[in-house]
Image (cartoon, helix red, strand yellow):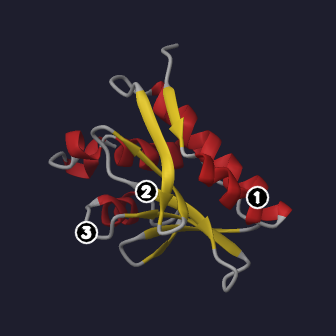
Amino acid sequence: MKTLQVKTNPDVELVYDTYPDYVREKILDLRNLIIQTAQEQEGITSLEETLKWGEPSFIAKKGSTFRIDWKKNKPDQYAMYFQCTSKLVPTFRVLYKDTFQFEGNRAIIFPMNFTIPKKELKDCITAALTYHKVKQLPTLGI
C-alpha cells in the first residue's frame, strides 16, 4: 500500500476535543474512513486536514473540500458537508437515495444511531477527493 501524507493543522484536534465523547467517537470514525479512502486512491499522495468555518475539513490536490461536524442545536445527528455548488450531493442523492439522509445540496446527515454503510460512503468520499478529475463523468465515476 502506498504512503499517504496527511498534513494536519494542529487546531483540528482542539475542535475534536470539544465534542461530547459519544460524538467524538463517531466523528473520528469518519475521519479514519476519509484517511483510509484517500490512502486507497491512486494518485492521491497527500491529504490536508484543516479547519474551514471552524469545522474539520479535508482536501486532496484534485478534490473538492469537504467537512465533518456535529452541531449542538442538532444533537442527534452529525454530518459530512460538501460544496453546495458542486455536483456531489445531487449525484449522491440519485445513487444513494435509499441509503443516506441529505440536507439540501450540501450534506449527508448521519443520525447518531445509524450504522454507516462504509462502501457507499467511501464512494462518496472518493468522489469528493477526486472531484476535479471526475466531475464531467456520469455519476462522478461511482
Whole-angstrom CA distance, mark 2 to mark 3, is 12 Å
Residue at 60% across, 44% down: 118
Q: Which image quarter: residue 35?
A: top right
Of labels 2 and 3, earlier in sequence is 2
Q: Are marks 2 and 3 in contact (CB under 8 Å)?
A: no
**Can you say whether 137 is above or below 69 in the image?**
above
Whole-angstrom CA distance, mark 1 to mark 3, is 30 Å
- The residue indicated by pointer 1 is 17
Q: Are marks 1 and 2 in contact (CB under 8 Å)?
A: no
Residue at 20% across, 49% down: 135
Residue 77 drawn at (x, y percent): 67, 73
Q: Secondary structure at mark 1?
A: helix
Q: Secondary structure at mark 2?
A: strand
- The residue indicated by pointer 2 is 66
**Amino acid type for the residue under numbered disc 1:** Asp
Disc sitting over residue 85 in the figure: 3
Residue 97 drawn at (x, y percent): 45, 66
Residue at 40% across, 46% down: 59
Query: The C terminus lies in which quarter of the figure?
Result: top left
Q: Residues within 10 Å of mark 3 (few under 14, many from 20)?
A: few
54 left or right of 18? left
Looking at the image, the residue that sits furthest to the bottom is 73
